[in-house]
Image (cartoon, rainbow, N blue to C red):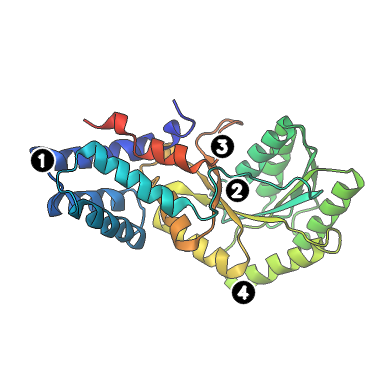
Amino acid sequence: MGIFDKGVKKTNRGFFDRLSHAFIGRSEVDVEVLDAIEEALLATDMGVDTTMKIIDSLEERVRKDKYVSMGELVDMLREEIAELLDVDNSEEVIPFDFSKKPYVIMVVGVNGVGKTTTIGKLANTLRQQGKKVVLGAADTFRAAAVDQLTIWSERAGVEIVKQEMGSDPASVAFDTLKSAVAKDADVVLVDTAGRLHNRVDLMNELTKIRNVMRKVVPDAPHEVLLVLDGSTGQNAFQQAKEFARATDITAMAITKLDGTAKGGVVVGVVDQFRIPVKFVGIGEGMDDLKVFNKKEFVGSLFSKEDIV
């Protein structure tokens, strides 16, 4: 079983239920089959624009040979989606450039998407790889956020820098990087407040954090990681749009894919924003944050073994 099978099982099953029904009694791919594929893709929350790109391309390909089996059609579909995901022209993401030390990651995302949990899991993974990690609790607007990150730091066995609730987030970020440099840390993960009620405030806050961090590490942050909840479907698109306007997003982590049939949202947000996914959350366990591999993900999303 691939590492993504658990995370996209519901999406896979729902898609092939629809597609198999469309193929019953048919020997060629016609308009009705393509309509069924379109409906199935939209049901995964891939988005209208991305879905139509795929359908238009499939229509062009099958026009040359109408006698396409379902297996061949799935191969075409997987190729089209893999191409849409290939925004960085690589076979597999190399998550971080550890030649930069400390490597500073600013993590953004609205409350409730699993942002703090993602930070904790990522810290655990990095520590297991032998990296010295420092967390910065710069979401000072919610006491629960600081408490939760503290718990994760203890579980992952990494250090945390924090201040009292209501403290200036930029001050926390500054202290975090100062501590990381003093302790010769390899990686810094800075949590930020997950608010979207006022885009101007969000932009100002993230810009301030970035500027203050650069007083300690001139090229920080090296990564701005946007965390999105895969189960929210179209809301994830809106969140990506707002954060992309507020700051320069360099990568994404998609969470909660194990509990949804909306796994197509991964494809949609990458296609629409041209930002690579580096991590996928597929469960609640400490080890359930996986490095994103395009080919393996697409293979799990549309597995020919599930054709009935």
Provide the residue designation for mark 4.
200
In this view, the mark in front (1 or 4): 1
Locate residue 215 relative to residue 284 in the image: left or right: right
Q: Which mark is residue 115?
A: 2
Q: Which mark is residue 27?
A: 1
Furthest-bottom residue in this view: 200
Residue at image position (21%, 42%) is: 19
The type of residue carrying mark 1 is Ser
The type of residue carrying mark 4 is Val
Q: Is residue 53 visible?
A: yes
Q: Position of residue 62 (x, y in %)?
A: 21, 51
The type of residue carrying mark 3 is Lys
Q: Earlier in the sequence, mark 1 or mark 4?
A: 1
Considering the numbered disc 1 on the image, is that residue within a helix, a strand or a loop? Answer: loop
Q: Which mark is residue 40?
A: none
In this view, the mark in front (3 or 1): 1
Is residue 13 placed above or below 116 in the rendered structure? above
Q: Residues within 10 Å of mark 3 (few under 14, many from 20)?
A: some
Locate residue 77 relative to residue 240 in the image: left or right: left
The type of residue carrying mark 2 is Lys
**Marks 3/2: CA–CA distance:** 15 Å
Residue at image position (63%, 65%) is: 248
